[in-house]
Each structure stands twice: as C-alpha cells, then as structure tokens.
Amino acid sequence: MAGIAAPSRLGLGEAKLNQVQQDPAWARRLLIFAALLSLGLLLVLPLATILVEALGKGWGTYWAAIGDPEALAAVRLTLLTALICVPLNLVFGVVAAWLLTRYKFRGRDLLLTLVDLPFSVSPVLSGLIYVLLFGLQGWWGAWLNDHNIRVIFAVPGIVLATIFVTFPFIARELIPVLESTGKDEEEAAKVLGASPLRTFFQVTLPNIKWGLLYGVILCNARAMGEFGAVSVVSGHIRGETNTLPLHVEILYNEYQFAASFAAASLLALLALVTLLAKNIVEQRAGRERGSAQ
Amino acid sequence: MTDLTQSPPSPSGRTQRVPAAPGFHLCLGYTLFYLGLIVLLPLAALFSKAATLGAPQWWALVTDPRVLASFRVTFGCAAAAAAADLGLGLLAAWVLVRYSFPGRRLMDALIDLPIAMPTAVAGITLVTLFVPGGWIGRWLEPLGIHVAFTPLGITLALIFIGLPLMVRSVQPVLQELDPDVEEAAACLGASRWTTFRHVLLPQLAPALITGFTLSFARVIGEYGSVVFIAGNMPYKTEVVPLLIITKLEEYDYAGATALGALSLGVSFALLLIINLLKRRYASGEA
C-alpha cells in the first residue's frame, strides 16, 4: 500500500479514505462480473423465460389463455382475496405497530414474536391449521357441516389462510418507522388540544405514510401470490376455488405450458410493479428525509 | 404496564396527564383479539391434534424411513442453500455498496424479486430453465450435471428464495461500517484481502449469521418454488411440506399434523441454537 504516504496533508481525509477503501481494479472487475453473472442467471433469466414461454405460441394463444373463463375466474378470486385481506391486515398492522412502539408492557416481546410467527411457519402449515379448525375432521367441522357452511375447499378458507400468511407485513414495516419518528410531535399535538384521532391522521400518518404504503404493497403482492397455504385449503375446484397461482399450477401439470406461463406472466407483472413501487416509495421517503434535515 | 408517552410532571406539581398515544386497552384488546383468532386458535388446534397421538404413533412417525428421508432432504438442501446464499449474498451486497457500475440500481431493485415473485411462478420458471432441454439445462447436461428433479434442483430453488434475505441483512451493515478501521488497517500495511478477512469480516459476522438464520428458516418450509423442480420422488427428492400435503390428500390428518408439529419443533430448535451461537459470538466480541 504505497499510496498511503499521501502527498499533502490538506484534504487528506476524504481522498485518502476513498483510496484506502478502494479495491484493486482487477478485483473490482472480477467481483462485479461474478455478481452480474450469478444474479443475471438467477434473477434476470427467469424473467426472460416467463416472457418467452408465455409468447412462445404467439399472441393468439396468449390472449386465449388469459381470456379463458377459468383464468378470469381465478383472477377475480385472487383480486377478491386481496381486497378482503389487505384492508383487514392494514388496520391490524397499524394498531399492532402502534401498540408495540408507543407502550411498554409485560409480554411485549412475546407479542412481537407472535406477529413475526408467519415468517417462520411453512405456508403448508399455515393452511393445515385452518383445515384442523374448519375441515370435516376438524374442531368445528361437524357443526359447520350440519349448518351447511363451507370454509375449507371454499373462499372463506382461502381468505383466512391468506390473512394468516400476510398479516405481519404491514406491522413489520411500520414498527421501525414508528420507533424512529418518536412520540414528540404526537405529544405536542396532544398538548395543543388535538383529539387522538386528529393526532393520528394529521401528525402520525404523514410521518409513516411511506412505510405504510410499502407495507401495503408487500402485503398485497403476497396475498395475490400465495401458493402453499392456499393450495392446502382450496381443494382446486376449477372456476370456483382456484386462485391465479393455483391456476398456473394446474395448467402446468396438464402440460399446457404456454397457457400456464401466460397466467404466470400476470403474476410476474405484479411482482415487477411491486418492485417498481417499492423503489419509488423508497426514493420519496429518502428525499423527504433529506429535505427534513 | 407503563405509559411511555406520559409527559413529565409539570413544575406546579399538578400533573397534566398527556397520553399522546390514545387507547392502550383498545389497541391491546384489538391486537390480542385478532392474533387470537388468526394465530393462537389455529395453532391450538394443531397442538391439540398432535397431542392426541400416542407414543407408539409418534415413534412410528419418527422412525418411518420415508419421513426420515424427507427431513434429510429438506434440512440438507436448506443448509446447503443458506450456505450458498452466504457467499452469493455477501458478494452481491459488497458489489452493490462498494462499487459503481452500469446497472447497479437495477440490480439493487431486482434483489427483491424472489420476495415479490409468487413462489409457484418461480417454481415453473426454474424447472423450465434447468430441464435437460432448457436454456441452462442444455449446457449442464453434457457435463453430467443434472439439476431438475434432483436435490441440486431443490437447493437451487431455495438459493433463489433465500438470497434477498441474506443481501438485505448484510447490505445496511456494510453501508454503515466505519471507514476509519479500514484506514487503520491499510496504514499498518495490511493488504486489502487481509483487511477484509481480519477487519471487515468479523464486523459483518453478526449480519451474516442473521441472514443465514433468516434464509434457513424461510427455506425449510418452502413449498411453491420447490415442488415443481424437485420431482417429488419419495426417499429421494420429497421435502417435508410436500409429504404433509400428501398425507392430507390421503385424509391422514393425524399424520399430517404430527409431521407439521415435528417440523415446526425442529426448525424452532435449530433457530434457537443458531441464536444462542450468535449471542455467544457477540458477547465474545465484546
């Protein structure tokens, strides 16, 4: 490291730090190449595959697969599921994050662990636990059967399993944001006589809106894309209890690859929109932080 | 319970109570109600069902060669994938934080693709790439490397799923590293490689362990992205989540439940061990 004997003492800090933290050019190039190659193979190539496979038999086949009544029913069910799950989890996420960051109470750590639980539980188990409650052999199966209420192999089961899988997302995004904004502004609002609701909507919400939005985006992406949990409780009834991911699976297993990838392309689009939205949200949040300081 | 947001008593002695956060009991009640309904009740059903099994049934389960094989496949592939993500994640995080190159921002955004992409889509896509005639498979097949429908394929799918968890654990820590330490190492004549091994790596270790734990925990239960590429042959490429589904489809609810409870127990035990190791490591550093 000959470069260390810096020529001038002036402006030493900045320039030297950069130089010291710099790797040799060959190492830099090698590492960048290795990263681009491996991530290209692992992340970019799959996206290209979806596009090529979906359009492999031409646009006609593509639109026919998307416009198929069963595909449309799957899209509708997927949208309906997200439409129920996201608002419910939104309210829960805000309340739970508020509770966990604004109060100190016994059992707080336990509650935090419970909120994180779905992250470490297999999707298959997330479906299984509802089968054990509502399935024919489950706790309430006989009663539900007597009253002709279907939960498992029907839409309510799909919604419940999806709620379970997606409920941590919004709370998880909000907890660090609420922790970092602190409670000073809320206290000030309170002292000035604002009602709790007004404090929340005019003081807290503007501070957490980007985190909240990002949580909603993630929650929605997972709600629409969940496969394992939904696959256990759905029963795969075509046109009735098939969500879009399940529709993709059925077509694939029937060797209708073009149609399967056409349906998958809708979900891949959802993923890309999610990533884009995430980036926009992060940029906005970063800019606001920058202007605030 | 103490109200964190309570303001200090005013000098006059007459405390004007200012609970900036409204409704502790309301929030707590609602959170517990929701969690109870969505999480605790179903989990109680799981454990009460598992508890109805007698000791002989449990013994039969844990000595069943097919169950044992599925646990070997699942945990083996998960460990291999998390280990591979350790290297790949560190590489990606390092390159993203330290270097500037065309496509850096795009790469940063794409890291989260496996989180945003529905697992079933990832599954059918990976298997299409790696079957013998696929874009990547056709290059590997002549070399005698079979990916699709082998444990290697399962591991690959799990590497894909675990990667963002690893990168996002390491990246912020790498960004916040104090440059002074590196500077000192360089001043003392250390090469970049020595600096990396003896100065940077120890500082990154907790983040690496966290990332390993997160991705390991996530991929143990993975189903959607694995089930297509695995081939699902009993004893060879059958993972635990798939075996649970198979048992459910055979209406063997007790077997499925027991297997579920067992895998939950094993993964929690493993995570506990990893967390203990991490704590010991952290206290050893301090």
Image (cartoon, coloured by chain):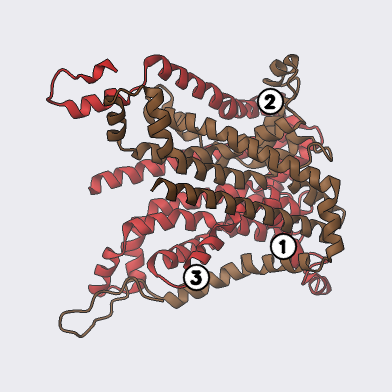
Q: Please identify which colour was used for chain B in the image.
A: brown
The letter of the red chain is: A
Q: Nearer the viewer, mark 3 or mark 1?
A: 3
Picture coordinates of residue B270, whole percent (x, y) = 62, 50
Which residue occupies the foreground of this view, B117 or B16? B16
Mark 1 crowd level (few <14, some 14–19, many ≥20, 10 Å Cα): many
Mark 2 crowd level (few <14, some 14–19, many ≥20, 10 Å Cα): many
> Would you say A256 lies left or right of A114 here?
right
Give the amino acid at mark 2: Leu
> Upstream in the sequence, badge 3 or badge 1?
3
Give the amino acid at mark 1: Tyr
SS category of the residue bearing label 1: helix
The circle on residue A130 is: 1
Give the vertical position of B64 relative to B102 (above or below). Answer: below
Please determine if labels 3 and 1 lie on a single subunit: yes
Q: Is residue A80 visible?
A: no
The chain letter under disc 1 is A
Q: Is residue B140 visible?
A: yes
Q: What whole-number distance in Å separates the C-alpha atoms at marks 2 and 3?
A: 48 Å
Q: What whole-number distance in Å separates the C-alpha atoms at marks 3 and 1?
A: 26 Å
SS category of the residue bearing label 3: loop
Give the vertical position of A206 relative to A110 (above or below). Answer: above
Residue that mark 2 sits on: B129
The circle on residue A107 is: 3
Please determine if labels 2 and 3 lie on a single subunit: no
Which residue occupies the foreground of this view, B286 or B111? B286
Q: Confirm or deny contact between disc 2 and disc 3 (CB under 8 A).
A: no
- Residue at far bottom of view: B14
Task: Give the residue drawn at x 40%, y 55%.
Answer: A176
Query: Count the marks: how many?
Result: 3
